[in-house]
Image (tube, coloured by chain):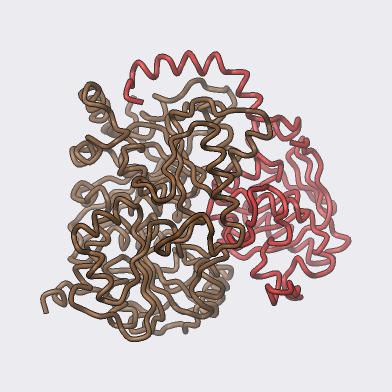
Chain colours: A red, B brown
Amino acid sequence: MNPVKIISGIAAPFTRINVDTDAIIPSREIKAVSKKGLAEGLFSEWRYTSMNDRTPNDEFILNREPFNRSVILLTGDNFGCGSSREHAVWALQEWGIQAVIGTTFGSIFYGNCIRNGLLPIKIPSDNLQRLIDFIEKDPESNQILIDLETLSINFGSSEIIFEFDKKYQASLLEGLDEIQQTLKLNDEISSFEEKHLVQYPWL
Amino acid sequence: MADTLFDKIWNNHTISDLGDGNDLIYIDRIFLHERTGSVALKSLEEKGISVRNSKQVFATIDHIVDTLPGRGDETMMPSGSQFIESFRESVSREKINFFDLNTSRQGIVHVVSPEQGIALPGITYICPDSHTCSLGALGALAWGVGSSECEHALATNTLIKKKPKSMLISINGIPKDGVTAKDIILHLISKHGANGANGYAIEFQGETIDRMSIESRLTLCNMAVEFGAMTGIISPDKKTIDYVSGKAFAPKKEDQKLAEEYWESLKSDDGAYFSEVIEIDASKLNTYVTWGTSPQHAIEIKEKIPAIDQANSSKENESIEKALDYMGLRENNAIKGTKIDAAFIGSCTNSRLSDLRVAASILKGKKIAPGIKAICVPGSSKVKKEAESEGIDKIFKSAGFEWRESGCSMCFFAGGESFGEDERVISTTNRNFENRQGKKTRTHLASPATVAASAIKGEITAFHPKEKQT
């Protein structure tokens, strides 16, 4: 995983509530046993007026200038609820989204973001509204800068500090591979396992 | 210290406190399906990492495979066979316990798992599928993960996880005839919202739960994720032990006593702390159906569709307006009597033998309304076989239902088979999201009894037990 430190650029307010992972990447857009080739299917039911020839829906925010160049998505409550498909994260990333900022996220989706370096930031709704107000004044110029090291969102002359799990912060900043890290603990795992299987021999 | 049921299982599986708020948790069993399991196994292979202990890993085919009689690896979903073949190759390479197509143990993961004794009380259990929380019904600490976390568990038998907050949902009172676990969970989500339990693990307790069958508990816990929870869990009792005993992958006779001693200890202590408590009087509830595009858009069948401007926030009002537009419904109208085009009985929520029996008892000697497309997809090959031995298939077929092979089927549209545009489906599934069951298909979630009664009438209606006698 590539390290994540600074993310800055155009942010798209897409604050519909309960946007589920079926909407982010419909099941039928997952066409191969692969983490790639998913950007075209991102939000496909909303992004296109015709699925057959993929005619863009001009009303959909990510099809409009300057939001078609967004790197940050501002999301509504419970974004990413529903199915566990990690393809939702892979599709957002492949399209160009590097961070999602919202009040709450579906919990599996949140974990999937962390493990792929798509930065998920939770902030209260009043702060989310401040960001939306700022962007709406001038979406092209009013860009947002996120610094994962200082846990801050900078916009204009203002700043919002957000909370973030220390472990996740460190792994994202360093781009650590969680599996490789845990494999180093194999002796500890094996010794736990030995006792565990004596205690629960049916497993 | 007084611990919750969740604490006890968590503590029994904590290898170490990683010192940053996260614990290293041992994972006992992992179940995979061809949709998300295939990508996890392939990705591990590409990294040159093998499955740490394949004996603890189980796999079946349910998500993409067709459910029409005579099915094989070729699917109506374009490229579906690629998933099936890649998955089969991976599970064979890793020597994973595999319940392939056209074998007796195949079926929907969350239906197969309890019936084969794979999910057990007191174990940690994951599957890269959000409805894994179903298995909390047996007292397992079971939750859905993404592919990357699944890879981590396959490679290390562990997950790194922060303990969630605890929520107690205490359900008491005897439900009225015809009011089921599905109605209770829809009530809960409609009242507290689809993210009402975000950040929580739920424990269900109370008289209603004690009286509930294991299969109904599976339905209840299945939709914990639609409530935003990490999982739902129920303390194992005598019913659980009886249910689990003798299943293929359950403890063998020589370990049974030891296992039972452990299982009997799996209860929240008196005075255990829950960060949140919700109480429900189940005797006051009626049958529920969804009207919109989120499981929180549910009302009693006798109620009216809500008004657009009645929600707490403008965002919610906007969501109601969008949902009504998608569903082709009007605010303040009755939901009862809404004409339907199709009825679906299936999915990990409601496709077990008891669900099919309830539906069959209503359909017996009746015909579904003219023009209704009605499909029943048993949850597993075992459920199908048992239902057939009871003659349930004949009842469904003579009422006008299709009788299918087991799988997830039209719970979601994978690109192959679907319900049509603007078609209104009453469905025993778990998600009424936009386009979930087909492009522009309108889904109404309900219990098997409601779906059967509605299929007969051709419109949304509650099942009234007295109709059964006439």
Residue at the far right in the pictured view: A141
Total label count?
Answer: 0
Residue at the far left in the pictured view: B469
The quadrant in which the N terminus of chain A is found is top right
Is B467 drawn above or below residue B188 in the view shown?
below
Q: Is residue A169 visible?
A: yes
Between residues A96 and B321, which one lies in front from this camera angle?
A96
Q: Residue B154, how many percent across, how many down?
A: 54, 32
Residue at 58% x, 50% y is B83
Is A144 drawn above or below residue B78 in the view shown?
above
Residue at 29% x, 32% y is B250
Q: Is residue B284 visible?
A: no
Is A130 drawn above or below residue B450 in the view shown?
above
Lateral position of residue B233 relative to residue B262, left or right: right
Between residues B51 and B329, which one lies in front from this camera angle?
B51
Examine the image and state in which quarter residue B373 appears. Answer: bottom left
The quadrant in which the C terminus of chain A is found is top left
Examine the image and state in which quarter residue B296 appears. Answer: bottom left
Lateral position of residue B392 relative to residue B123, left or right: left
Q: Residue A125, how many percent across, how many down?
A: 62, 56
Between residues A38 and B121, which one lies in front from this camera angle?
A38
Q: Residue B260, how many percent across, how many down?
A: 22, 28
Is A83 drawn above or below residue B54 in the view shown?
below
Between residues B149 and B267, which one lies in front from this camera angle?
B149
Residue at 48% x, 38% y is B164
Q: Residue A145, how many percent across, how many down?
A: 81, 48
